[in-house]
Image (cartoon, rainbow, N blue to C red):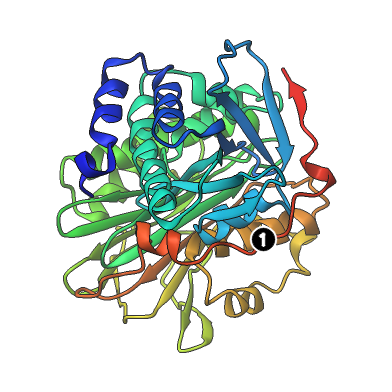
Amino acid sequence: MDRDVLGLGDVLAEAEDASPVESVDVVARNLRKRFGADRVSFLFVDLMGEELVRLTTADGDEHTGRATRFGLRGSVYEEVLRTQRLYVEPDGEGAHRAIAPVSNRGDCVGVLELTLPCADETVLRQVVDAAHALAYIIVTDRRFTDLYHWGRRTTPTSLAAEIQHQLLPSSACCEAAQFSVAGGLVPADDIGGDTYDYALDRDTLHLSITDAMGHDTESALLATLLLGALRGARRVGCAIDEQARRAHEALLGHDRGMATGQLLRIRLDEGSVQLVNAGHPRPLLLRDGAVEELALFPNLPFGVNSPAAYRVQELRLRPGDRLFLLTDGMQERAAAGVDLPALIRDTRGLHPRETVQVLVTAVRDACGGHLEDDATVLCLDWYGAHRAGRRPSADDALRAVVPAPRPHGNLTPRAGD
């Protein structure tokens, strides 16, 4: 992207000079100046994935500590987030309302909404590029402020839920040339200690999914100890069986209880997988339209004394494979009526981010919104060592103006604390 041609160089420089809590407003002012845009705002999804939060606008209003939020399901915003495509419609007053995805490496940060007096292709392309630049700014700035964390909390958050959320990756999705990975977690009414994690090295993708026994702060603290040990071992270059051993020793040494887990190391140059299973539900593999449960040897859970060393098992991914890691909450009694293999087959054409949302929503709905245990899923698409993947570009976002339905009654705003 040529930032000078698009006029984004100045706004990025201005955003870098501004306070982290002002950078979105800097971008909004720039859009008004460059395009005569009006009613510019940035919106993103709350922690529960149910509402969209309008955190900041460019109308000169001061931050008041109150967020305007909207129901997400069935809205045009949900369609933009799902498809990662620009949406444009006449506003009835001679201008055009535009909604662009704000995304970075598969991480759907939110959407940028604005009204444009002119909506020709040149302007729309620059709006899409501005939204992409905004994603980079927000990803950088959210390290320095609680503003974005505050805005996502539309309901009270317990101490256990706060701990659990901080254990998860800062982005639920990541894309690279060889793969896309996305995770989703629906917390139980009494937090159940689930986590998922990923990390990308130069030639390796690391994945993990864990389930700490117990509930509430007890399980959250156990999960903290477990994930800290796993990340510490991974970051000093330990082999996957040594990562498992150190996590096991951490739980034994602190007498905190036990946890199940699954650890994977994927070679990006060939798709070979090393895997350790510590008493965890088996992964599901979608290959050539068929779903199979992988037959793995299960070691005992972390924190349970055993004379056996952790066994490293191997798997070879093929281009087009889709791999799912699950916790037992995805298969709990109340969710037994959810046909996960059928859903996995039916959603094979969707992005992993969308598939994860379909699966966790189905489980949550089956449980009436009240889960007895956390339900977590991690979905990996493997494109191949030399494939270009399916990362959306600015041209992709512009190519199809989303023919989404007009907003319905669930978009009526309300102020939240």
Say if 282 sits above or below 364 in the image: below
Q: Nearer the viewer, residue 392 or 200?
A: 392
Q: Nearer the viewer, residue 32 or 222?
A: 32
Q: Where's residue 58, x and y in %?
A: 53, 23
Q: Where's residue 178, x and y in %?
A: 27, 68
Total numbered badges shown on the rendered structure: 1
**Residue on which disc 1 sits:** 404
For residue 278, side relative to residue 97 (left or right) = left
For the point 73% across and 69% down, which residue is it? Answer: 338
For the point 44% across and 74% down, which residue is it? Answer: 322
Q: Where's residue 258, x and y in %?
A: 50, 43
Bin the neighbour count of mark 1 within 10 Å (Cα to Cα): few under 14, some 14-19, many 20 and up. Answer: some
Q: Which of the 4 quarters of the picture holds residue 272?
A: bottom left
Say if 176 sits above or below 194 in the image: below
Q: Residue furthest front?
A: 94
For the point 57% across and 10% down, which residue is it? Answer: 62
Say if 125 sits above or below 248 in the image: below
Look at the image and tell me whether residue 410 can be seen: yes
Look at the image and tell me whether residue 305 can be seen: no
- Residue type at mark 1: give it: Ala
For residue 166, side relative to residue 15 (left or right) = right
Indicate the quadrant containing the C terminus: top left, top right, bottom left or bottom right. Answer: top right
Q: Nearer the viewer, residue 322 or 27?
A: 27
For the point 79% across and 59% down, which residue is it? Answer: 366
SS at badge 1: loop
